[in-house]
């Protein structure tokens, strides 16, 4: 495990870490608005929800043979029974428009920028390691809800540029290859015991659990470094 002096990159989860939220509330509102947006194009709301959830589960199991975007849409078309490729651009429009309304159902975080600025100290690279199951437009929209932007990160993972997802440790190894820093020189900060703590630890990273919106695992209990978001900010300011 890397010592504090050896940390050269800091990775951040988004949902429940930088961006406070109840994920069940977020998911419900997101799927409701997405299905309503697509309904005029001939996809029934129930079909849209089921196909989106099923294709996402398939994408999460992606083994690195293709980008997550390709895995998602291939399975989505199978689930609706037809290859409606125009739906790709239609959903892109959704993330640039109605998706913004989901902001009403998540929290605020005035200290998010303080954390990112602390992470950048001493020339460290900073990665938004949010599960790459959304297109880049959705990732950028969500970070804007806490006053952040694309230039605040050296890398943002999305379904467009990733071939693995959490909780696959290869997701974290792939990030390391992209930024040119070994896992033992990385610190992962997240709120999910399985997706963040377990998977990143298996990849060889040091981890810190943010407990404000903690997601516990039935099969893995994190016993390492932890604290509130505010405590995590202070930890980084001393790093």
Image (cartoon, rainbow, N blue to C red):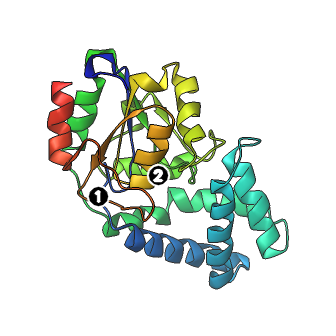
User: Which residue is painted at 27% across and 15% down in the image?
Assistant: 122
The residue beneath circle 1 is 20
The answer to which of marks 2 and 1 sits earlier in the sequence is 1
User: Considering only vertical position in the picture, is 176 above or below 45?
Assistant: above
Where the C terminus falls, by quadrant? top left
User: Which residue is painted at 84% across and 65% down in the image?
Assistant: 83
Expressed as whole percent of the image width and height from the top left, the position of residue 141 reads: 43, 51
Frontmost residue, 55 versus 188: 188
Q: Callout 1 environment at 10 Å: few (<14), some (14 to 19), or many (20+)? A: some
Residue 108 quadrant? bottom left
The residue beneath circle 2 is 195
The residue sitting at the right extreme is 82
Frontmost residue, 78 versus 199: 199
Instruction: Decide if residue 192 is in sight here.
Output: yes
Residues at discs 2 and 1 in contact (Cβ within 8 Å): no
Instruction: Decide if residue 140 is in sight here.
Output: no
For mark 2, give the secondary structure.
helix
Where the N terminus falls, by quadrant? top left
Expressed as whole percent of the image width and height from the top left, the position of residue 183 reads: 47, 26
Expressed as whole percent of the image width and height from the top left, the position of residue 197 reads: 40, 46
User: Considering only vertical position in the picture, is 146 above or below 25?
Assistant: above
Taking the image as shown, residue 91 lies to the left or right of residue 182, namely right
Taking the image as shown, residue 150 lies to the left or right of residue 83, namely left
């Amino acid at each position: 495990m890397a010592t504090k002096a050896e940390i050269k990159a800091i990775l951040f989860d988004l949902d429940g870490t930088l961006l406070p939220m109840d994920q069940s509330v977020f998911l419900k509102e997101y799927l409701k608005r997405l299905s309503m947006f697509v309904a005029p194009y001939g996809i029934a709301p129930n079909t849209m929800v089921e196909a989106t959830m099923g294709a996402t589960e398939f994408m999460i199991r992606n083994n690195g043979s293709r980008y997550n975007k390709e895995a998602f849409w291939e399975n989505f078309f199978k689930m609706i029974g037809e290859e409606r490729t125009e739906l790709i651009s239609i959903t892109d429009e959704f993330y640039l428009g109605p998706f913004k309304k989901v902001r009403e159902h998540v929290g605020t975080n005035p200290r998010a920028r303080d954390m990112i600025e602390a992470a950048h100290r001493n020339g460290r690279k900073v990665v938004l390691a949010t599960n790459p199951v959304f297109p880049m437009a959705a990732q950028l929209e969500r970070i804007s809800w806490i006053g952040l932007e694309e230039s605040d990160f050296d890398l943002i993972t999305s379904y467009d540029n990733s071939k693995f997802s959490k909780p696959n440790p290869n997701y974290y190894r792939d990030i390391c290859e992209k930024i040119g820093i070994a896992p033992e020189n990385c610190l992962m900060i997240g709120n999910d015991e399985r997706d963040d703590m377990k998977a990143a630890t298996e990849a060889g990273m040091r981890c810190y659990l943010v407990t404000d919106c903690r997601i516990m695992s039935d099969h893995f209990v994190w016993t390492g470094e932890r604290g509130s978001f505010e405590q995590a900010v202070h930890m980084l300011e001393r790093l």
